[in-house]
Amino acid sequence: MNITEKFKTIFEPELLREIESKAKIVSVKEGDVLLDIGQTVRIIPLLLKGILKITRVDQAGKELLLYYVHANESCAMTFTCCMQQYPSEVKATAESEVEFLAIPIGNMDEWIAKFPTWKSFVMRTIRSRFNELLNAIDQLAFQKLDERLVHYLKEKSKATGSSLINLSHEEIANEMASSREVISRLLKKLENDKKVLLYRNQIKLLREL
DNA sequence: ACATTAAGTGATT
DNA sequence: AATCACTTAATGT
């Protein structure tokens, strides 16, 4: 895997060399938990391949989806946590087979001071993620569940690159911190509106969605 | 054919 | 919108 190729448009050459020498390539299987709540961040992941799912977990162990980290992105939470070695507030799970560059956190201070492209990369990912989080809050506060569901389905489809979603209603309900029956009813409504097709453990998104 | 699990439904809060 | 109790449908053995 040629890291330099992949990132040469966003990072300066000197930084690329630095990454090559300091970062390790790590791959994990689908479902692997990269970081659990309470754990301390030790490395910054730079995604090369696959999708990372970032969730919050409540006392009962229910998970609420916060956002996905796609290829060529990094997780904003790790930046903010790692700077001062705070334990993680979120859980990161590999949504598919994932390959990422593990950058030791020791380099962060230096890199930010030394490399403008690194600094702006960090700032950019924090800013866009922060905006997404604001969005998520708006959804929880002001949007009805049916709108959240549509948003969820679209995100999922984008994450997997397919309009066919392989999830049961129960799994969706868990990720949205809702209940199965409610999700079933909302999906039924969407099906009646010709927005989706429902199968067992599968949902097909239609263009009208 | 039977058991198991997903999905659908009406009533209740 | 959540929960309960129950039914119906799909799937695995």
Image: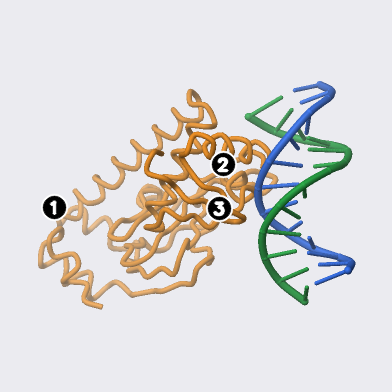
Chain colours: A orange, B blue, C green
The chain letter under disc 2 is A
Nearest to the eye among marks 1 and 2: give it: 2
The tag earlier along the polypeptide, 2 or 3, is: 3
Q: Determine which residue is flagged by label 3.
A: A37
Query: Is label 3 in a helix, a strand or a loop?
Result: loop
Q: Amino acid at mark 3?
A: Ile
Image spot of residue A189 (x, y percent)? 56, 34
Q: Amino acid at mark 2?
A: Met
Nearest to the eye among marks 2 and 3: give it: 2
The chain letter under disc 3 is A
Q: Residues within 10 Å of mark 2 (few under 14, many from 20)?
A: many
Residue at 41 percent across and 68 percent down: it is A98
Residue A115 falls left or right of residue B5: left
Q: Determine which residue is flagged by label 2.
A: A176
The tag earlier along the polypeptide, 3 or 1, is: 3
Q: Nearer the viewer, residue A196 or A165?
A: A196
Quarter of the rendering occupied by the C terminus of chain A: top left
Q: Nearer the viewer, residue A180 or A107?
A: A180
Q: Residues within 10 Å of mark 3 (few under 14, many from 20)?
A: some
Residue A188 sits above or below residue A98 on the image? above
Image spot of residue A72 (x, y percent)? 28, 60
Image spot of residue A175 (x, y percent)? 57, 46
**In this rendering, do the residues under marks 2 and 3 share a single chain?**
yes
Q: Amino acid at mark 1?
A: Pro
The chain letter under disc 1 is A
Q: Residues within 10 Å of mark 1 (few under 14, many from 20)?
A: some
Quadrant of the image occupied by residue A45: bottom left
